[in-house]
Structures are given as C-alpha cells and as structure tokens.
Amino acid sequence: MASGVKPRVKVPKKAAAGDSITIKTLISHKMESGQRKDKEGNAIPRSIINRFTCDFNGENVVDVTMEPAISTNPYFEFEATVPEAGEFKFTWYDDDGSVYEETKAIAIG
C-alpha cells in the first residue's frame, strides 16, 4: 500500500429526486510511472491509481481506466442524476493491489 494516500469526495447532502448533481473527487497519491530512477540509479517501481469507479446504490455511474501519464493526485469532477436517496461508493484501485474506498450518502429533500 502506498503511503500517504488519502481519498477526498464532495457530494451534496441533499437533492431533489431526478436532480443532476456535481461530484468532485481527489485522491492524494504520488503516481510513480516506473520510468524514473532513484539517487542510486535503480528504477523506482511503478505505483499508479489505474482505475476509479463510482457506484450509486450498487449501480455503476463512472468507471475510468488510468494510464501512467495521469497526474499526481488525480482529480475527477462529474455529474450524476439522483433518482432516490442512497449512497455513493467511490473506489480507487492501485497497481500494488491496494484498494481505497470512500462512501457518501445523499438524501432526497
């Protein structure tokens, strides 16, 4: 597991049924491509977030595959329609097998 990895998510607490909302996500991650070398000349192992998903009440909303050229601390902003109250589940997958998750509930009101 990479050190210092911290997912952050911003989802409105409430929305009207059928509303389109803006979701913002950021994960603190160094995103090492595997191309660079350390001070001794050894290759620094690749360590990137290679996939990001967002589900709402178990149904997929977003599924993104990332490549080594992705920037450090990847940020995603996207729209989602909220048909009912429920929970968003955000998942980031790391090359080293680590999985980082965050959940946010939204109410209808």
Image (cartoon, grey):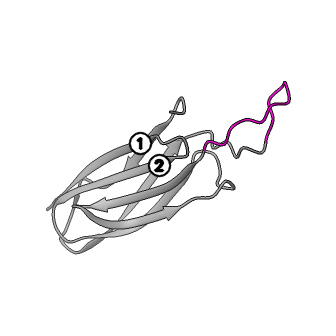
Residue in view at x 43 percent, y 55 percent: 24
**Residue 31 image point, x, y percent:** 63, 44
Residue 40 magenta = yes
**Residue 93 image point, x, y percent:** 47, 49
Residue in view at x 39 percent, y 68 percent: 79
**Residue 21 image point, x, y percent:** 33, 66
- Residue topped by disc 2: 93
Secondary structure state at the residue bearing disc 1: strand
Distance of mark 2 from mark 1, alpha carbons? 7 Å
**Is 103 placed above or below 55 here?**
above
Residue range of the region highlighted in magenta in the rendering: 36-47
**Residue 5 image point, x, y percent:** 50, 35
Extreme-top residue of the structure: 40
Crowding near the residue tagged with mark 2, few <14, some 14–19, many ≥20 C-alpha atoms within 10 Å: some
Q: What is the number of the mark on residue 73?
A: none
Secondary structure state at the residue bearing disc 2: strand
